[in-house]
Image (spheres, rainbow, N blue to C red):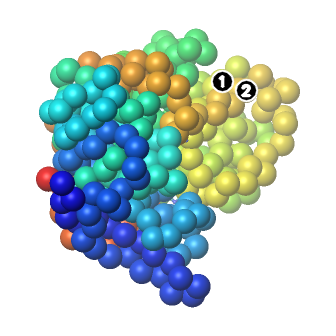
Amino acid sequence: MNKSFHALVVNKIEQSFSRRIESLTLNDLPEAGVLIRVCYSGINYKDSLAAIPNGHILKNYPFVPGIDLSGIVVSSEDPRFKKDDPVIVTGYGLGVSHFGGFSEYARIPADWIVPLPSGLTLKEAMRIGTAGFTAALSVFRLEQAGIAPDKGEVIVTGASGGVGSHAVALLSDLGYSVVASSGKSAEASSYLKMLGAQSVIAREAVFDGTVKPLQKQQWTSAVDSVGGKPLAGLLGRMRYGGYVAACGLAAGSELPATVFPFILRGVNLLGIDSVSCPMELRQVIWQRLAELHKPEKLAAIAQKEIPLSQLPNALPALLSGKKIGRTIVILN
Ligand code: NDP
C-alpha cells in the first residue's frame, strides 16, 4: 500500500521559504515505527516557530511540523501496539527532527507512543496536547517540592496562552487559589475566571519593565510560561522559600536576574521539560490529566478547531501573543 494523503510541508531553499499543504505518500514518512492515522493535532508556540523562516526549530527541509498528535494505529510491528489502538504522541523528536502531527498519517517510533488513557477521547487529548501536559508536569513538580493549596497563592504567567490556560484550570480544580497574570487582562478576564482564576492581574503587575532584585513578597508558587525579563521580575516577588516552575520563553530566553531571591529568600527555580520527559512519568501525567480533566473547561480552552487547509495561515498568527487558549487541528 502506498496511499497518498495530505500534510503541511515547510521548505526552505536558500532565501526562499514555503509553508503549504502538499500530497505525500507513505513512502515519504520515516521508515521505521508504528503507522498512525492522525485524527487531531494542535498548535503550540514551537509549531509556529517551526513554520517561519528563522524560527530556529528545524534543521532539515522539506519537513512536516506538528509536535502533537492523537490517532489510531493502522499497523505496528511492535508488540506493544496493534491495529485500531487509540494513541497520543507528544515531544521527543516529533515535529522537530521527525515528521510530525500536521499530517493525515505519521510513522512514529513505538518508544514515543502513549496509549490513550481511558476517560479521554482523542479530541480531548489534543485539547490538552503539549500545552496541557506541560502545565500538568509543572503542577506535579510543584507538588513534589511540597507546594499544596494551603501554602498560599500560585501565580500563572502568560495565563491566556495554551500552557497558561491549562495551568489555571488544573490548579484551580486541585483547590489552589490562582492569580492569573495576562497581557490581555481586560479581554481575557472572564475567560480566565471561568477556568478558575481567583483574580486576574495585568502583566505589568508582575514585571513593570525594570528588573529589581527584591520586591514585595507576593506568591508562594508560580507556573511561568513567559521566561525572559518578566521571569527575573517574578523571582523578586516570590515569597520566602517559594517555587517557580519555569517552562517557557514567550518573552525571551535570557534570564537577566540576580542571585538575591535565591540566597536571601530561598526561592527555588524548577526546570520543566516536556520533550524528553521519561515515558514512565509521561504516562503518570497523562493518566492524571485523564482523571482530572473537566470536558467543559477543555472545550473552552480549545474553542478553535481548524482543518489542515487553514494551518498555513493559523500557524504564524500564534506568535502575535494575541490568541487566547489553544487551537486544535482536525485531520481525519
Ligand atoms: P502561547 O502562545 O499559546 O502562549 C504564550 C502566552 O505568553 C501568550 O498568550 C501571552 O499570554 C504570553 N506572552 C506572549 N508574548 C509575551 C511577551 N512578550 N511578554 C510576556 N508575555 C508574553 O504559547 P504556549 O502556551 O504554547 O507556550 C508558552 C511557552 O511555553 C512557549 O515559550 C513555549 O515554547 C513553552 N513551552 C515549553 C514546553 C516545555 O517543555 N518546557 C512545552 C510547551 C511550551 P498573556 O497575554 O496572557 O500574557
x, y (%) of residue 69? Answer: 31, 45
Occupied quadrant, residue 252? bottom right
Tag 1: residue type? Answer: Gly
Q: Kindly tell me whether mark 1's CB lies below 8 Å from ligand 1.
A: no
Occupied quadrant, residue 216? top right
> Label 2: few (<14), some or many (≥20) within 10 Å?
many
Residue drawn at (34%, 28%) of the image: 78
The image's mark for residue 327 is: none
Q: Are marks 2 and 1 in contact (CB under 8 Å)?
A: yes
Residue drawn at (26%, 63%) of the image: 25
* Nearer the observer, 35 or 320: 35
Q: Kindly tell me whether mark 2's CB lies below 8 Å from ligand 1.
A: no
Element class at badge 2: loop
The residue singled out by tag 1 in the image is 242
Q: Can you say which quadrant of the picture contains the N terminus?
A: bottom left
Residue 78 drawn above or below residue 163: above
Q: Is residue 278 left or right of residue 290?
A: right
Q: Is residue 38 left or right of residue 130?
A: left
Tag 2: residue type? Answer: Val
Residue 193 drawn above or below residue 52: above
x, y (%) of residue 307? Answer: 18, 63
The residue singled out by tag 2 in the image is 267
x, y (%) of residue 270? Answer: 65, 29
